[in-house]
Image: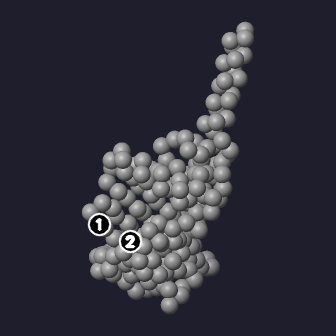
Amino acid sequence: MKKIQACVVLSILISNICFAAPRSADAEQFDIAGVKLGMSKKAAITAITQKLGLGVNAVKFDEFSQVNPVTKTKEPAYFTVKTANMSVVVHMQPKVPYDANEPMVVSIIIYEQPWTQQNALAMKKMALEKYGKPSNGVIGVAYHWCIEPHSNPGFGCSEFYGPKLVLSGTRLRLEDTQYQQAVIDFMNKRKTSKPVF
C-alpha cells in the first residue's frame, strides 16, 4: 500500500514539473534579426541589414509580385536574406487602413539554419536567453511564446490568433495572423452590398 501511495505522490510531482502553468509572453515586442512585426518594409530592411552586418544588395525581393488588393499596385509579398549558414524570410501584408507612406507591414518573420543537432541546441539556447521561458514550458518538441497560451501546455499557442513566436528545431517563426485577417476583412467589406431583388 505504501508503495502505491509513494508512486502516486511521485507521479503527481513529476506531472507538476513537466506541465507547469502556461506563461504569458508578449511576442509583439520580440524581433528576429532586428525585424519586428508591424514594421514598414523600409524599416525592416534597415533593421535586418544592420543587425546582420550586410549590405542592402543582400536583400532579395519576391520576383513574382502580384497586384495588391489594398494598394492596387504591384508589391513584393516577401523578401529574403541568405548567408551560407542561415536564411531569413520576411513576409508582408498591406497596411489596413491604407497608408501611402507605409503601404506594406511585416506580418511573418522566419529564421532558419541547416538542420544539425548542434544548430538545434544552439538555437534553443539563444531563444531562451533572448525571449525568456516559453509559454508552454520547456517540455516538448516546439517552444511557443504568446500572450494567451492554451491552458493545456501541450497545445502551446496553437489556438492563439495574435502575435506568437514558435521555435521548432532550427526554425524560428514570428507571426501575427491579424495582419492577414485585416486584409480579408477589407476585401469582404469591399464586396459587401445591399441585396436588391
Q: Residue furthest bottom?
A: 100
Residue 164 at x, y = what percent? 56, 60
Query: Which quadrant holds the N terminus?
Result: top right
Residue 178 at x, y = what percent? 57, 68
Q: Is residue 123 visible?
A: yes
Three-letter residue code for mark 1: Thr
Against 106, residue 138 (above or below) is above
Q: Which residue is mark 2?
A: 52
Q: Residue at x 47, y 51 (%)?
A: 124
Label 1 and label 2: CA atoms lie apart by 10 Å
Against 86, residue 99 (above or below) is below
Q: Residue at x 36, y 45 (%)?
A: 117
Q: Residue furthest left?
A: 84
Residue 188 at x, y = what percent? 55, 74
Against 87, residue 121 (above or below) is above
Q: Residues within 10 Å of mark 1 (few under 14, many from 20)?
A: few
Q: Is residue 28 left or right of residue 66?
A: right
Three-letter residue code for mark 2: Leu
Q: Which residue is mark 1?
A: 83
Secondary structure state at the residue bearing disc 2: helix
